[in-house]
Amino acid sequence: MSDNHERIRAILREHGRLSQDPSALGDNADLYQAGMTSHASVNVMLALEGEFDVEFPDHMLKRNVFESVNAIGSAIGELTQGR
Amino acid sequence: MTPRLSNLSVGIDLVQISAIAESVDRFGDRFLDRVFTPGEIEYAKASPAQFASRLSARFAAKEAVRKALRLDGVAWRDIEVVRHDDGACGIALHGTARHLARTDGSGLAVSLCHENDQAAAVVIATRDA
């Protein structure tokens, strides 16, 4: 899981348009409060799909799915379950 | 009849046009097809010089609709900016967005603008008492 969190942080660093480096944010820190816009969250989602070879279904396009490293990690875990 | 203020809600959003252009460059059709309807893409492509600004204003409108109606868990494509015969823009809702909002979009008013590197949209929603 921690490896996934590092991969998620790398994507946030490149696409999240955060006001600070993601390595300085806790796993539960609010990414929207850290500056991530709704547009940036779309970029993050597309980059996550490429990185983890998954596709986010429409019902997962919720604000809380992308609100923290932990929340994104849980979503990736759900999408890759059984692999 | 004048709507009661308590039956009105508003949403607003501001988008950086160059950031939308960067998403198109970076993710290509994956970004376009995930966020915009075929009609929106066709309208944007009709003016290459305004391609990114038209997309940006539409992205802002979609987010403004989400804010006005407090929609979550809906596809971006399910919120569409349409153009009426007189050139004015309106909103059409599809799929889950239409279901959750209990409207096809006819109760929504939208205004779009863009200048320099910014695009913005305001949406006002009316709902029955």
Image: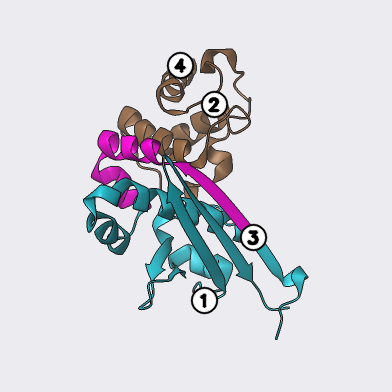
Determine whether B81 is above or below A58 in the image: below
Q: Which circle, 2 or 1, is nearer the viewer?
A: 1
Q: Residue at x 35, y 55 (%)?
A: B36
Cα–Cα gap, marks 4 and 2: 9 Å
For the residue pair A21 and B75, the one nearer the viewer reads as A21
Chain in cyan in the render: B
Q: Which circle, 2 or 3, is nearer the viewer?
A: 3
Chain in brown in the render: A
Magenta-colored span: B10-35
Residue B59: image location, x then y, percent: 43, 51
Q: Considering the image in quadrants, where does the C terminus of chain A appear?
A: top left
| Residue that mark 4 sits on | A6
Q: Residue at x 45, y 16 (%)?
A: A6
Cα–Cα gap, marks 2 and 3: 30 Å
Q: Which labelled disc corresponds to residue B10?
A: 3
Find out whether residue B76 is within the magenta segment.
Answer: no
